[in-house]
Amino acid sequence: MSVITHDSIQPSAGEQLRQFVTFRLARVQAKLNAQSSRILKDHSGITLTQWRLLSLIGAAGSTTAAHLSREVAMDKGLISRNIKTMVADGYVRVSVDPDDSRAQNLELTESGLDMLNNTAPRMHARQDAIHALMDPEEEAVMNRVLDRLERAAEERN
């Protein structure tokens, strides 16, 4: 009779993939993004990407698409398409940078500021609910781990 040990049991490729840190992070991110998107769609009609961009533009007062791209690690084309939509919807104003005529400054319009102010309480409540799932020590550990993972992701191998 042969003895089966833990070492002799090979997990399937699917089971192995489910244990990859990147797979797990992507899965959690997709679920959290879907949840945020539902909240925004139900209450404002803007997308999660648009809300993030509105938030960053609002916080900066004035910024550029290039700066937003670096800040959120998002494709410039995706940012450009969303900015065009937000300009057409009257949420963002674009002006030529007086110091660099190739750059365009982005600012919130009154409508954009209203949209941000109307959606922020719901999004902050959602963040509070997520934070409530962890005690302060767990949150501190998670933030340290995420910082390390982000630095590792920036390294060239």
Image (cartoon, helix red, strand yellow):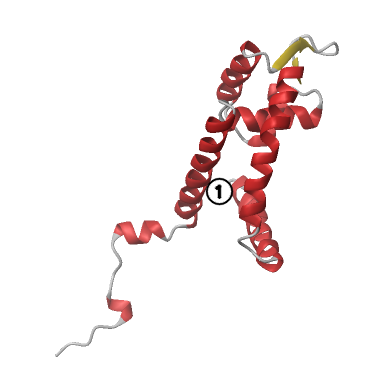
Tell whether 3 sits left or right of 7.
Answer: left
Q: Is residue 131 visible?
A: yes
Secondary structure at numbered mark 1: loop
Q: From this view, report whether residue 26 is shown above or below residue 115.
A: below
Q: How many numbered tags mark residues here?
A: 1
Residue 108 in picture, x, y percent from top left: 75, 20
Depth order, front residue of 157/75: 75
The quarter of the displayed image where residue 96 is located: top right
Look at mark 1 in the image and give the residue it sits on.
157
Residue 97 in picture, x, y percent from top left: 81, 13
The quarter of the displayed image where residue 105 is located: top right
Mark 1 neighbour class, 10 Å CA radius: few under 14, some 14 to 19, many 20 or more? few
Q: Residue at x 65, y 48 (%)?
A: 127
Q: From this view, report whether residue 23 is shown above or below residue 81.
A: below
Depth order, front residue of 116/87: 116
Q: Residue at x 68, y 44 (%)?
A: 124
Q: Is residue 106 visible?
A: no
Tell whether 90 sits left or right of 157.
Answer: right
Residue 98 in picture, x, y percent from top left: 85, 10
